[in-house]
Image (cartoon, rainbow, N blue to C red):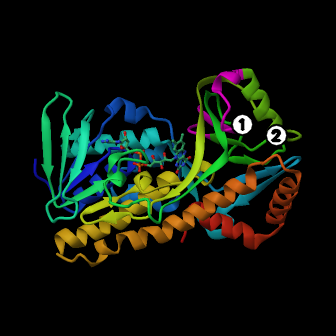
Amino acid sequence: MKTQVAIIGAGPSGLLLNRYLAKHGIESIVIEDRSREYVEARIRAGLLETQSVKLMEELGVADRLYKEGMEHKGIYLQVPGERHHIDFEELIGHTVWVYGQTEIQKDLDAACDKAGQEIHYEVTEVALHDIDSDHPSVTFVDKDGNSQKIECAVIAGCDGFWGPSRKAIPDVEVGSFERVYPYSWLGILANVAPSTDELIYAWHPDGFAMHSMRSDKVRRLYIQVDPNDDIANWSDDRIWEALAKRMELTGWELKTGEITEKNILAMRSFVSGKLSHGRLFLVGDAGHTVPPTGAKGLNSAANDVRFLGEGLVDFFNKKDASLLNRYSERAKETIWRVTHFSWWMTTMLHTSGNEFDNQLQLSQLKHLFKNKALQTNLAENYVGIR
Ligand SMILES: Cc1cc2nc3c(=O)[nH]c(=O)nc-3n(C[C@H](O)[C@H](O)[C@H](O)COP(=O)(O)OP(=O)(O)OC[C@H]3O[C@@H](n4cnc5c(N)ncnc54)[C@H](O)[C@@H]3O)c2cc1C
């Protein structure tokens, strides 16, 4: 196979990039090691910042988002006995949208189908070759067991944190940074209408709790747990009790319902030392990850897509490599801002079991409730105005 850009991974990064390139007349081939059904059903992100919504609109995949998504004007922050609304719209005139990654994935797949863009699912043995040269290639075995080779000018590594692209960069660990947090999130999906109009982030001495949603019928809730905890220790009743206790507020009730999914996820921040090498470029989780507290993972993947897309459009359509050569530098500026914001939200809201730390966190949150400058800073970072 021959193409201009070989894209490894059909998650949000891979398919957004495919649609961005197609819009500008640039050909790409996408390969993915999972099935389409699996990728479409994977429960992950659910909150889109202004820039991500704009990108989806530009790519013609925002119709259902505008019809079925929920526009949120702010978030609630809570300490025991006090819930405070941070009003993004009033503070900075921007909003965010609640719309599940599963739905984004379906919309991107449908757009690819409509455009006749083939995606090679269930591939194995993916390997990158000659990334230092002008003619790199990707080899893989297709789902029928045939060996395949894609010859291309550029490889986009959109294959997530565990994929092969980052590992293909020599000495990539030099200058890479990682922080693994001493807490995890137990996340549930529940078939019950939200008990709140906007997301609640609650600090509690027992640990952080969060109420988010995917639609007006489906809720996504999280509680902080120990990283060594086992999901088997958490019956549905115990989860609902912990959520109700940590988010308790006079006059407010957390309605319960059927839990359809529950799992524990580790929390880490990671930034790769290099986001590009020769003709290979890392996009999204392949190059960096954040804990989900600030809802930034998918949004920073969308930022990368725009930066790389702009570079590739100049490279292929104007024969100008200058923007492409600056991809890593441009993307990293945003990545570090996002990494700091996610770290700040995470460390402000998760308890460590130390009473001194608790008092510092409470002081910081109560100061935030009163201080418009701090709220504006939170709002700008949350909606992604940089
Ligand atoms: C449980 C959870 C909750 C999250 N919540 C949020 C949130 O609330 N807000 C937010 O913004 N972000 C959230 N995130 C992060 C967000 O989901 C990711 O940042 C986003 O999916 C990144 O997109 P991506 O395409 O870069 O990577 P991925 O979605 O990981 O996609 C990479 C793709 O590459 C494929 N792949 C891997 N290896 C290979 C290979 N060898 N060959 C071919 N394909 C391969 C994978 O199967 C996958 O489809 C969450 C993540 C998790 C895990």
Instruction: Tell which circle, 2 or 1, labels the residue nearer the N-terminal end.
Output: 1
Verify whether residue 180 appears in magenta: no
Residue 241: percent from the left, percent from the top? 79, 28
**Number of marks:** 2
For numbered disc 2, what is the local secondary structure? loop
Q: Residues within 10 Å of mark 1 (few under 14, many from 20)?
A: some
Residue 308 in the figure: left or right of residue 279: right
Task: Name the residue tied to disc 2.
Answer: 206
Q: Amino acid at mark 1?
A: Ser
Residue 24: percent from the left, percent from the top? 22, 63
- Depicted 67 relative to depicted 157: above or below: above
* Mark identifier at residue 195: 1
Residue 44 in the figure: left or right of residue 138: right
Question: Magenta stretch?
Answer: 213-236
Residue 54 makes an appearance in the image = no
Q: Amino acid at mark 2?
A: Asp
Decide which of 329, 370 is in the foreground and name it.
329
Residue 298: percent from the left, percent from the top? 48, 52
- Rendered residue at 37%/39% (across/down): 106
The quadrant the C terminus occupies is bottom right
**Answer yes or no: do the residues labelled 2 and 1 have beta carbons within 8 Å?**
no
Looking at the image, which residue sits at the far left? 1
The answer to whether the beta carbon of the residue marked 1 is less than 8 Å from any atom of ligand 1 is no
Residue 364: percent from the left, percent from the top? 81, 63
- Depicted 325 relative to depicted 378: above or below: below
* Mark identifier at residue 130: none
For numbered disc 1, what is the local secondary structure? loop
Residue 240 makes an appearance in the image = yes
